[in-house]
Amino acid sequence: MHDPAEPHFNCTDRERAIFEAGIKLGTIYHQYVGVPINLSNLDSLAIAIRESVLVQPFVSGAEVKIDPEMVRKRQGVYKYITLAGEMLDVKIEITYKKEKVVARLNYVPDMAYPLMYLE
């Protein structure tokens, strides 16, 4: 894929792939956390998140899971809650030129934090 932005990046191709992964994971987190959910729309939301990230430049693969058990435990009287970072398990693959990186957004219990990291 031709990259017209390449002259604006003073980094290696691997660093660029990592940068792109961070942008994509940050976008997923900040666009979707807070969306109203219940057990009936988890699959469609996970598909929508996956499809939205797959159309972005350099994304060569994506998997999105939302933990239904967390939703089941937290839903209240109105049977819905809002999506929280700890419910997400996201894996994306970025290919920039010949460099490929796999990045994750996943809740790490020991840290009590939805961490974005490289595999």
Image (cartoon, rainbow, N blue to C red):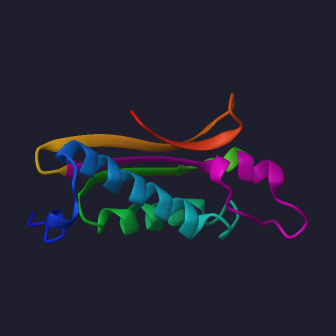
**Eyeballing the image, is 108 above or below 62?**
above
In the picture, measured across the screen, residue 26 lies left or right of residue 11, that is right
Q: Quadrant of residue 23?
A: bottom left
Q: Quadrant of residue 31?
A: bottom right
Q: Nearer the viewer, residue 113 or 65?
A: 113
**Eyeballing the image, is 107 above or below 30?**
above
Q: Residue 37's spot in the image, x, y percent?
A: 68, 66
Q: Nearer the viewer, residue 47 or 109?
A: 109
Residue at the (69%, 28%) spot, across then down: 110
Residue at the (82%, 59%) spot, across then down: 75
Q: Residue 93's spot in the image, x, y percent?
A: 30, 47
Q: Quadrant of residue 56?
A: bottom left
Q: Nearer the viewer, residue 80 or 9?
A: 9
Query: Is residue 86 found inside the magenta-colored segment of the image?
Result: yes
Q: Nearer the viewer, residue 80 or 29?
A: 29
Q: Residue 14's spot in the image, x, y percent?
A: 22, 43
Q: Residue 34's spot in the image, x, y percent?
A: 68, 67
Residue at the (24%, 65%) spot, across then down: 57
In the picture, measured across the screen, residue 31 lies left or right of residue 95, that is right
State the extent of the magenta-drawn residues as a range.
70-95
In the picture, measured across the screen, residue 45 lies left or right of residue 62, that is right
Query: Is residue 38 found inside the magenta-colored segment of the image?
Result: no
Residue at the (77%, 66%) spot, across then down: 80
